Image: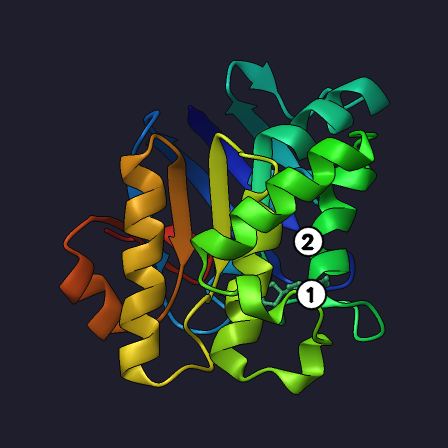
Amino acid sequence: MIQMFHVYKNYEGSLTALSDITLKVDKGEFIFITGPSGAGKTTLLKLIFGTETPTEGQIIVDGRNQSRIDSKHIAYLRKKMGFVFQDFKLLPKRTVYENVALALEVMGIPPKDVKKSVLRALSYVGLRHRANYKPLTLSGGEQQRVAIARALVKEPTILLADEPTGNLDPDLAISIIDLFKDINIKGTTVVVATHDKMIIERANKRMIQIQRGRVVG
Ligand SMILES: Nc1ncnc2c1ncn2[C@@H]1O[C@H](COP(=O)(O)OP(=O)(O)O)[C@@H](O)[C@H]1O
Ligand SMILES: [Mg+2]
């Protein structure tokens, strides 16, 4: 489903963020990307998502080469992948419903279908009753679940999550990982970047460890 071959990423004016990354994630797999802060976890997810391009190397997502990106391809990828951002990136002036709906509206889905899908996604994460609230009136755990609903509403085949348990207490963190496991059981390939060892140990899934931009285990 996801393959990287000798991928390098240098940001302008900084050291190498990723060096010679070669990895493979199978369809339907659940994996963790782990490593200390600055290791390159977020960069790795962004390369898969296509919002950053590799300096060198090849990235194949669902049989398509990420380095040959055109606008049609980008639209295809956006539909295919959901991304749960570390800082949620919820729009504070929009309601929970509107935040989730936007993910479908930008894809040109008709309003009738949008409503059905959004309410289903919110129910799935247990937030149907928060549909008309503004994000900042919710707890951190609830905001995280809104961000997850927004990533899931387009029924992606790949779900990428960046430190999804970062700001949550352990019980909530476990419930978020359980949610990802459930999503994975339904067939979605899940890639979670985290430095939270407790979560990784408890989940018992494959883990790719990176340090200073290199795979070390
Ligand atoms: N947009 C950027 N511009 C320049 N350097 C960046 C940028 N994003 C990340 N980096 C650098 O790349 C390295 C890896 O960062 P990142 O992928 O965010 O690591 P992690 O998510 O594991 O903490 C760090 O040294 C970081 O400072
Ligand atoms: Mg990061």
Task: Give above or below for 143 relative to 99.
Answer: below
x 23%, y 51%: residue: 217
Task: Please tell me in which quadrant of the rendered image residue 26 appears.
Answer: top left
Residue 10 position in % (x across, y down): 66, 51
Q: Read off the residue under disc 2.
A: 100
User: Which labelled disc corresponds to residue 122?
Assistant: none
Is 99 in front, or is 167?
A: 99
How many numbered badges does the structure rendering display? 2
The kind of residue tagged 2 is Val
Answer whether residue 93 is visible to the viewer in this image.
Answer: yes
Task: Please tell me in which quadrant of the rendered image residue 194 appears.
Answer: bottom left
Is 199 in front, or is 187?
A: 187
x 46%, y 66%: residue: 164
Q: Read off the residue under disc 1.
A: 96
| 174 lies left or right of 151 | left
| 208 lies left or right of 152 | left
x 53%, y 69%: residue: 144
